[in-house]
Amino acid sequence: MTVTLFELCGADPDLRFSPFCWRSRLALAHKGLEVESMPWRFTEIERLEFADYDKVPVLVDGDKVVTDSWNIAVYLEATYPDRPALFAGGPAAQRFMNAWADTVLNPALGRMILCDIPALLTPKGRDYFLTSREKRFGMSVEAFTAGREARLPALRELFAPVRAVLRHQPFLGGSGPDYGDYAVMGSLMWARCVSPLALLDPADEVYAWRERMLDLHGGLARKAPCVESQRL
Ligand SMILES: N[C@@H](CCC(=O)N[C@@H](CS)C(=O)NCC(=O)O)C(=O)O
């Protein structure tokens, strides 16, 4: 059974850096499904017309088309219940982690790493990205991320609830990962793939957890192309 996943890529089609696509990629690996990955660039709106959507990830499973990373996780859990669970005990805790990553972590990470993205895009993608983000944030991405090193301690502090859980168990899901882990890891993969910044302190539990996450599913995340300085 092979499913197709449309994923954001850079000028290099192998550079996949969307936090939302990473959630879906890891969720598909957790379910043990084979994936045909379709690289998609910001300006290729017409390639998603079949899905009536303008963002990725988009999942195609037979005649079923699913948009939005959370909907994809819910679909996978409902369609493949006999495979490892993404939401053991129901989706409440994972929904919270997903919402925390969307509303707290991703905005904070964006202020650290958005300025690293344009160099990784095609010229057309770069124009689109710079114009659309300037419109969204009311300033250039350089201004948006200015002084980012000084915000590193605050960024690390944001992980306090994640750290508190990881003091008691190796994964947010318990003894193994669940969708809550993938929701947060998606954000860290976004950063790892595009930015040279060392966001986490190696002495931090969150760093050790990220190492475990990088090794899951045959090292899927660790082997993924990323900026040179993160290739450890
Ligand atoms: N809520 C959506 C968000 C998807 C999203 O924003 N995807 C970005 C890639 S990271 C995108 O496709 N952006 C297109 C654009 O900015 O034009 C999800 O969870 O899948």
Image (cartoon, grey):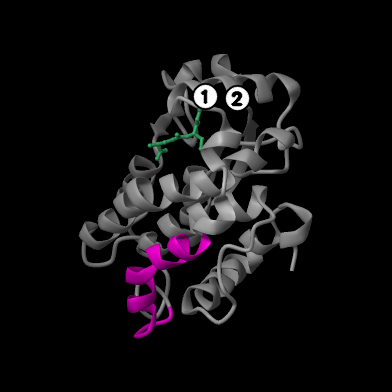
Residue type at mark 2?
A: Leu
Instruction: Say left or right for 98 vs 93.
Output: right
The correct choice, above or below, for 105 with respect to 72 in the image is below
Answer whether residue 1 is visible to the viewer in this image: no
- Pinpoint residue 156: horizontal percent, then vertical percent: 46, 66
The image quarter containing residue 171 is: bottom left
Of all residues, the one furthest to the bottom in this rendering is 168
Question: Is residue 156 within the magenta segment?
Answer: yes
- Pinpoint residue 174: horizontal percent, then vertical percent: 35, 77
Residue drawn where x is 38% and y is 59% of the image = 179
Q: Residues within 10 Å of mark 1 (few under 14, many from 20)?
A: some
Q: Tally the numbered discs.
A: 2
Q: Secondary structure at mark 2?
A: helix
Residue drawn where x is 28% and y is 66% of the image = 88
* Residue bearing mark 1: 134
Q: Which stretch appears magenta?
A: 152-170
Q: Are marks 1 and 2 in contact (CB under 8 Å)?
A: yes
- Pinpoint residue 3: horizontal percent, then vertical percent: 53, 41
Residue drawn where x is 56% and y is 14% of the image = 46
Answer whether residue 54 is visible to the viewer in this image: yes
Question: Is residue 181 within the magenta segment?
Answer: no
Instruction: Say left or right for 133 vs 80.
Output: right
For the stretch drawn in magenta, the main secondary structure is helix
Rendered image: mark on residue 130: 2
Quick one: 113 or 143, which is closer to the camera? 143
Tell me the CA gap for discs 1 and 2.
6 Å
Q: Residues within 10 Å of mark 2 (few under 14, many from 20)?
A: some
Residue drawn where x is 33% and y is 77% of the image = 165
Residue type at mark 1?
A: Glu
Quick one: 99 or 47, which is closer to the camera? 99
Instruction: Say left or right for 67 vs 43.
Output: left
